[in-house]
Amino acid sequence: MNRQTQAAVLLLIGVALLHGALTDLYLRYVKEGLRPLLLAAGTLLVVTALATAWYEWRRARREERGTGTGTGTGTGDGDGDGDGDGDGTGDGDGTRGHAHRESRVSWLLVLPLFALVLVAPPALGSYSATHTGTALQQPYGYAELPAGDPVPIGLVDYAGRAFYGHGRSLEGRSVRLTGFVAVTPSGTPYLVRMALNCCAADAQPVKIGLTGNIPPVLQPNAWLEVTGRYTARRTRDPVNDGPIPFLRVTAARPVPTPRDPYDETWNN
């Protein structure tokens, strides 16, 4: 791969990173807090690509000026045939032997970039949730819940308060949270949010069992906003024996997929 091709590939990668970071596309791959780093990386790659292209253009211009004015200096060798052995480096037509063609296979490196921009993968859903054990971890502490009824709360935050806090901070409060539906083979409905540390590759589900006024028809992967109250009911995840608290649902309604489908508050 020559320098021009390297510069083109760097430019395409940088533009793809900037496109993802300036839109919500990056949220399908990494958590929201990494946006500034993606913007910085994309800008650096674009600047590097432009600097490389400029350097190569300047070098090519210097070489053209140097070889285009060369003259042959061949001299006869005295045997009458005048077959000069000229050692000139240029013959005035700017050619120096034949150039080797670069392999076009290197351009296949840009195909994943077009897939990144044009075919964004969906967020992980119910299949991953039912085949992966819950990742609920004990939090270091609990912030005071804001005033209001119902109080909006993250699914992971509710799960931690319900299981490890034994619902003490939830007593007497009505909560509202959002997640997608997953149904176990036994028919138990879960409300799930995929939690991540860094990127979608390490995403793991946190699950809440639903009881009470559950909608009669639940479609896996459908997003719901549910309102309910704490219940002491709990179970264990059959995949990894992790804790799964329950929520007693009083109302539920379908909602569109949120801008950020992942929940990154689970390790706070």
Image (cartoon, grey):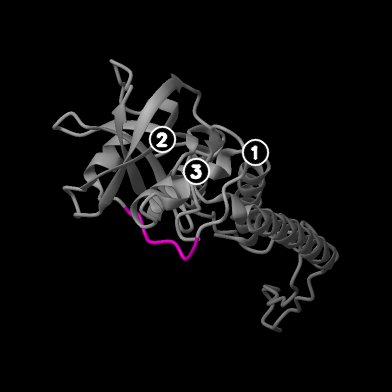
Q: Please name the predominant secondary structure of the magenta segment in the image.
A: loop
138 in the magenta segment: yes
Q: Residue 184 location, x and y as percent?
A: 20, 34
Q: Residue 212 location, x and y as percent?
A: 30, 26
Front-most of residues 141 and 51: 141
Q: What range is drawn magenta here? A: 135-141
In the image, what residue occupies the spot 80% across and 61% down?
64
Name the mark on residue 160: none
Label 1 is placed on what type of residue? Answer: Thr
* Residue 213 higher or lower than 128, as above or below: above
14 in the magenta segment: no
Q: Is residue 5 left or right of residue 141?
A: right
- As helix, strand or loop, the secondary structure at mark 3 comes to loop
The residue indicated by pointer 2 is 229
Q: Residue 176 location, x and y as percent?
A: 49, 33
Using the rendered image of the protein, determine whether residue 139 is visible from the camera's viewpoint: yes
Q: Are marks 1 and 2 in contact (CB under 8 Å)?
A: no
Label 3 is placed on what type of residue? Answer: Gly
